[in-house]
């Protein structure tokens, strides 16, 4: 099941430093993508990749902030025929 929302990648050794903020229609898939690319040294963001090389993937904390979806009720309007 896709979970939309925002997520942060934060360093545990430097908790005041947010390394990355992202939004996704499918947060679990995005986190999996980041982890895969970081572990195999293919991540396109050099700051993230260098941090993993220096401190290890275990130093990252993935924080999720799901987006609340509002349900809007739409009422069907019925038209009455005009009588002549």
Image (tube, rainbow, N blue to C red):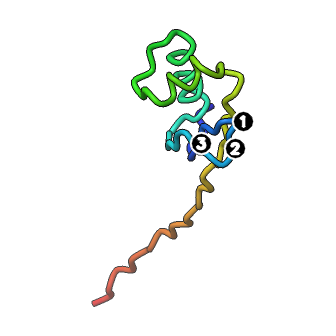
Closer to the eye: label 3 or 2: 2
Quadrant holding the C terminus: bottom left
Residue drawn 63% across and 31% down? 1
Whichever of callouts 3 and 2 sits on the residue coming sooner in the sequence is 3
Q: Are marks 3 and 2 in contact (CB under 8 Å)?
A: no
Asked whether 8 or 76 is in front, the reply is: 8
Disc ID at residue 15: 2
Q: Crowding near pointer 3: few (<14 within 10 Å), some, many (20+)?
A: some
Report helix, strand or loop for mark 2: loop
Q: Are marks 1 and 2 in contact (CB under 8 Å)?
A: yes
Asked whether 39 or 23 is in front, the reply is: 39
Q: Is residue 4 above or below residue 40?
A: below
Disc ID at residue 33: none
Left or right: 40 as drawn, with respect to 44: right
Q: Residue furthest top?
A: 40
The residue where tag 3 is placed is 8
Q: Crowding near pointer 2: few (<14 within 10 Å), some, many (20+)?
A: few
The residue where tag 1 is placed is 12
Q: Is residue 44 above or below residue 21?
A: above
Q: Crowding near pointer 1: few (<14 within 10 Å), some, many (20+)?
A: some
Place of residue 29 in the rendered image (x, y in percent of width and height, measured from the top left): 56, 26
* Picture quadrant where residue 9 is located: top right
Residue drawn 44% across and 14% down? 42
Closer to the eye: label 1 or 3: 1
Place of residue 80 in the rendered image (x, y in percent of width and height, measured from the top left): 39, 80
Residue drawn 60% across and 52% down? 67
Residue drawn 59% across and 42% down? 8
Residue at mark 1 to residue at mark 2: CA–CA distance = 5 Å
Report helix, strand or loop for mark 3: strand
């Amino acid at each position: 099941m896709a979970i939309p929302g925002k997520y942060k990648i934060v360093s545990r050794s430097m908790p005041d430093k947010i390394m990355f903020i992202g939004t996704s229609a499918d947060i679990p898939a995005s986190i999996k993508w980041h982890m895969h690319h970081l572990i195999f040294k293919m991540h396109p963001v050099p700051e993230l990749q260098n941090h993993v090389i220096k401190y290890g993937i275990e130093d990252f904390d993935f924080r999720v902030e799901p987006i609340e979806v509002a349900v809007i009720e739409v009422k069907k309007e019925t038209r009455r025929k005009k009588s002549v």
